[in-house]
Amino acid sequence: MTDHPLEVELRFEADDEGPLDALAVADRLGPAWLGPASTVDETDRYLDTADLRLSARRWACRLRTRQGRTLVSLKGPGEQQASDPFHRRREVEGPATESLDPSHWPSSPARELLDTMRGGEPLEERFTLTQQRTERPVQLARRHTGLLSLDRTQIWRGGAQIGGLLSVELEVDPIALERGADPTPLARALSAHPGLRPDPASKLEHALQLLGADR
């Protein structure tokens, strides 16, 4: 599974909505220019088998519905080093539907990988995230470098809200990395932003902590 694309991102948790509001209108992030802001609503459903076969492999399955389109994302275990502010993990994506049965989705490498990991077992919904996401393109040296996301997230299970999260994420474009872009100044700029603190946990991990789950 080491040949799957690598997702590289920064994650920060906000004390309140102030940092999200400020970053939504700022012109720059350190040396980078921030593009126009656009806001969308998303619903993320996290799936696994009843015996947690994906979790046992340290992979996660997310069904994201956004503007009428559903996408499946399979995310692998983190590959972060202690001195590295960036979170790295393998990610495989493909088209899907809102059905929990992957046989109803279009064929894709993501569906094939999911079928391998679940071993024929049906999928169940563990919990749901609903979020309002404001996105801004990030440019360094006049080149697209990544996407800044300002997220207001609610965590649901069984129709009841169990928590919420205010977060800022910066996903670095892998093509920009291949061309030699250095996103380190962006990490410094976000680390210095008032009201933000580095977040070692993913949204999945935050939700599992609220649920009192081991994995």
Image (tube, rainbow, N blue to C red):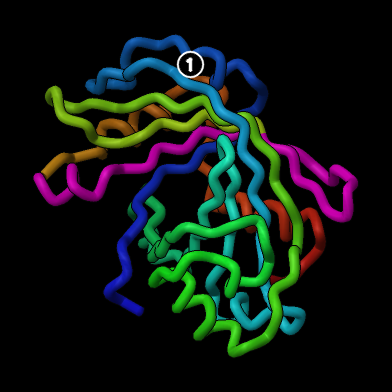
Q: Quadrant of the N terminus?
A: bottom left
Inspect the magenta stretch and tell me whether residue 183 lies in it: no
Q: Position of residue 210 (x, y in %)?
A: 79, 54
SS at mark 1 in the image: helix
Mark 1 lies on residue? 24
Q: Which residue lies at the image location 53% right of the left edge and 23% below the top edge?
A: 39
**Above or below: residue 58 compared with residue 208:** below
Q: Nearer the viewer, residue 86 or 9?
A: 9
Q: Is the residue 201 above or below the residue 3 in the image?
A: above
Residue at 67% in and 62% down: 99
What quarter of the picture does the C terminus occupy? Answer: bottom right
Q: Position of residue 176 (x, y in %)?
A: 18, 42
Q: Residue at x 58, y 50 (%)?
A: 64
Q: Residue furthest bottom?
A: 119
**Image quarter of residue 209:** bottom right
Is 159 within the magenta? yes
Left or right: 180, with 72 as reference point: left
Q: What secondary structure prevails in the magenta region?
A: strand
Of residue 168 and residue 193, the one placed in the foreground of this image is 168
Q: Is residue 69 above or below residue 82?
A: above
Residue 8 image point, x, y percent: 34, 51
Where does residue 204 sit, x and y in percent of width and height? 63, 56
What amino acid is labelled 1 in the image? Ala
In the image, the segment drawn in magenta is 153-179
Instruction: Please tell me whether residue 192 is drawn above or below residue 208 in the rendered image.
Output: above
The foreground one among 99 and 60 is: 99
Q: Residue at x 44, y 18 (%)?
A: 37
- Taking the image as shown, residue 21 lies to the left or right of residue 108, namely right
> Mark 1 Cα within 10 Å, few/some/many (few <14, many 20+)?
many
For the image shown, how many numbered marks are present on the structure?
A: 1
